[in-house]
Image (tube, grey):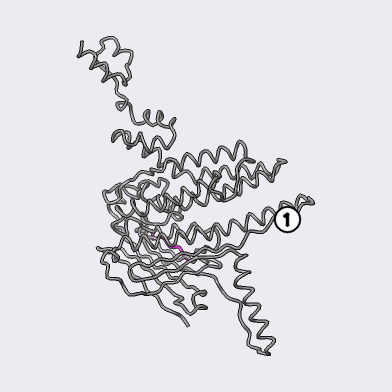
Amino acid sequence: MSIHVEKKCRTSSRCLTRSEASNGQHWLNFESLPPEVLELVMRFLPYSEIANQMRLVSRKCCSVSTTILNSAFLSSVQRTRRVMEHLERASKDATDGELRLGARNGLELVLHQCSLLRAVVWRYTHPPSSSSQFERHCFYAGSILDDLDAILRQALSSPADLCVKDDSGQPIGKFTAACKKFMNYFEKVTERKINKSSLISGCKSVDILDCLLEGREVRQVRISRRSGAVTMRIRYVLSRAWFTCLEVPLGGNVDENSWRDRQRFMYLRLRRLIGSFNEHYLEKVHYDRECQLLKDANAQLPMPKPPPCSTYSGYGEYGGSFFYYGNMNEFAYESKVVDAWRRTTALRDRNNKRLAIKKPNYDLVIDVELRCSPDLAPLAIRSTLKCDDIEYLDESEAESSNPEMYLRMSVNCPASKLNRLPSHFDWELRSPSEPKTTRRTRSRS
């Protein structure tokens, strides 16, 4: 009797088939289901439960959970764009065009965060090769995917309730804060453990810079027919931005010479710089769009209040270098820089000094020179390489090719020159037998 009860307790969570019920000896385990069936069942669960619970059950459940989470993560940008296109078509005929416009503005902020999130993580969730050097990792932020689905459903069902204000209490504000927090954690904990070579992270810096909403210019693209090697020259221009590097005496900490941390902090600086620039850019675009909507409607309503002056700045010292970077929106630039320039020009005119003073140039210019194998190419160029399956390349091509990469990023900062600081900074990333990064700073007169 005790044996029967013990067996009943062990098998109470199992499913019994019709044929197995006749003899009462064979039981069907949940994990004995085919992976395809198990995936269909698990897709009914929230992503947070898949990431926090089902992924930890067994190896099989972990593999299926990783497939579900990674596919939902990679399609987040396309799904957001489809909802935005739907709102744009609906706003042309609907009477609540202003409300749908507000939802569209909010989704642009969501799309910006999804693009940055993809640039940071996609090389680890969808590696270019199935070799042991490129392991597939799971996008374990299931709550972010749940929040994204909730925002997209709300944008389709009730766009008027979708608030676009950057408030931590609103859905979009919560989503933005969660994305930033996860990217910081992923780079500090997960990526630092597995990024042992420049061949692992690849052209991640280019992927981050490609998230720039304005100022990207592709100057040259060449793809070798024989080896598929990619050669690119890209220029990024960030208006009203600065990026300065100062050499400081090293404090004697040997750990600060860590190649991983030096590379990770560079990714962090670029991501925060691009993120703040895009937020200021979207703020101005949304303001102009609301003003144009009121003009087209011929409504006797006051114009919306201009955005306040906003300035973002970041700094940090690591490995003998001190970095100071940031940007400001158009209103802060007019208030702080242009007004001071006008006062100085008027003072010189009163003193009868005919020497003309040029308007301050705060355009940060980043030139990137890239040469890499096709499996390490940036995400924006992979469609040109005809890689329909982003997860894995052909096995024969992956084994025969020798991954290599050379990336040189030259930063020219006129704003630093105006303040008598080093205005030029070079950062190189190579892929020899041993990873190596170099940096050079100099001041141009």
Q: Residue at x 60, y 68 (%)?
A: 333
Looking at the image, residue 292 lies above or below residue 60: below
Looking at the image, residue 200 lies above or below residue 244: above
Q: Is residue 302 left or right of residue 313?
A: right
Q: Nearer the viewer, residue 259 or 353?
A: 353
Q: Is residue 17 left or right of residue 362?
A: left
Residue 336: where, in percent of width, then height?
60, 71
Looking at the image, residue 191 lies above or below residue 233: above
Crowd tier of the residue under label 1, counting other residues whose Cα lies within 10 Å: few below 14, some 14–19, many 20 or above? few
Q: Nearer the viewer, residue 198 or 334?
A: 334
Q: Which residue is mark 1?
A: 303
Quadrant assignment, res 66: top left
Q: Nearer the viewer, residue 313 or 68?
A: 313
**Residue type for callout 1:** Met
Region rendered in magenta? 219-224
Quadrant assignment, res 291: bottom right
Q: Residue at x 37, y 51 (%)?
A: 186
* Residue 222 among magenta residues: yes
Looking at the image, residue 26 lies above or below residue 308: above
Q: Is residue 132 left or right of residue 330?
A: left
* Residue 103 among magenta residues: no
Q: Residue at x 36, y 43 (%)?
A: 138
What secondary structure is the magenta-colored segment mainly?
strand
Q: Is residue 107 left or right of residue 97?
A: left
Secondary element type, mark 1: loop
Which corner quadrant holds the N terminus? Answer: top left
Residue 351: where, in percent of width, then height?
67, 89
Q: Residue at x 48, y 44 (%)?
A: 76
